[in-house]
Amino acid sequence: MGSIGYGMTRRLADKVFAQAGVSWDEVGVIELHDCFAANELITYSTLGLCAIEDTHHFVERGDNTYGGKYVINPSGGLEAKGHPLGATGLAMHFSITSTIPQGPGLCRLPVCSTTHRGSMALYINIGLGGAVVISLLRRPEFYRAGGPDGRD
């Protein structure tokens, strides 16, 4: 597990959430590096979405898709669009920014409703054993959908 960045990813995720002062309850959408199906499944436990021994239950309950706890890879992930060497991170970041919630409980995805988690989106890209990038994203407070953004 160490060779695929398990510990490094977990430490960085914990640091990102601590610095932002938010919890997983505020995340509804996640784009993660799924270069292989097995890598996606391992990343669930790496991030703490579920225990490693509970990963199959996490998937069986649908906690990784619409109607579950999180919508993971709503873009279809890397497996759906190929693995554009060098452009992977850019493509993933673009995908997640286009699903960032537009305000408290508002999002382009059904996971983000007024009664469900989802004011933030998470992006994670892993380079085997040597690099990891995690971005916790939300629309700025001044953002106004469909009109002036609210800045003076």
Image (spheres, rainbow, N blue to C red):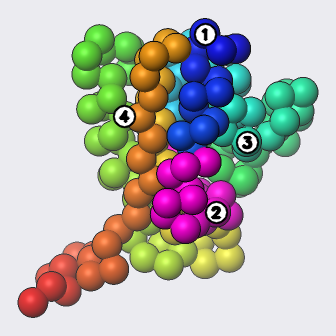
Q: Nearer the viewer, residue 145 or 137?
A: 137
Query: Is disc 1 placed on a helix, strand or loop?
Result: helix
- The residue under label 4 is which amino acid type? Met
Query: Is disc 4 placed on a helix, strand or loop?
Result: helix
| 139 up-or-down from 68: above or below | below
Magenta span of residues: 14-31
Q: Position of residue 69 (x, y in %)?
A: 72, 53
Q: Position of residue 122 (x, y in %)?
A: 49, 48
Query: Is disc 3 placed on a helix, strand or loop?
Result: loop
Residue at the spot of label 2? 23
Q: How far apart are the two marked residues, 1 and 3, measured between alpha carbons?
A: 18 Å
Q: Is residue 16 in sight in this rendering?
A: yes
Q: Position of residue 117 (x, y in %)?
A: 64, 66
Q: How far apart are the two marked residues, 2 and 1, measured between alpha carbons?
A: 27 Å
How many numbered marks, from 0 up?
A: 4
Outermost residue toward the left in this view: 152
Mark 2 or mark 4: which comes first in sequence? 2
Residue at the spot of label 3? 48
Query: Is disc 2 placed on a helix, strand or loop?
Result: loop
In this rendering, would 141 be left or right of 63? left
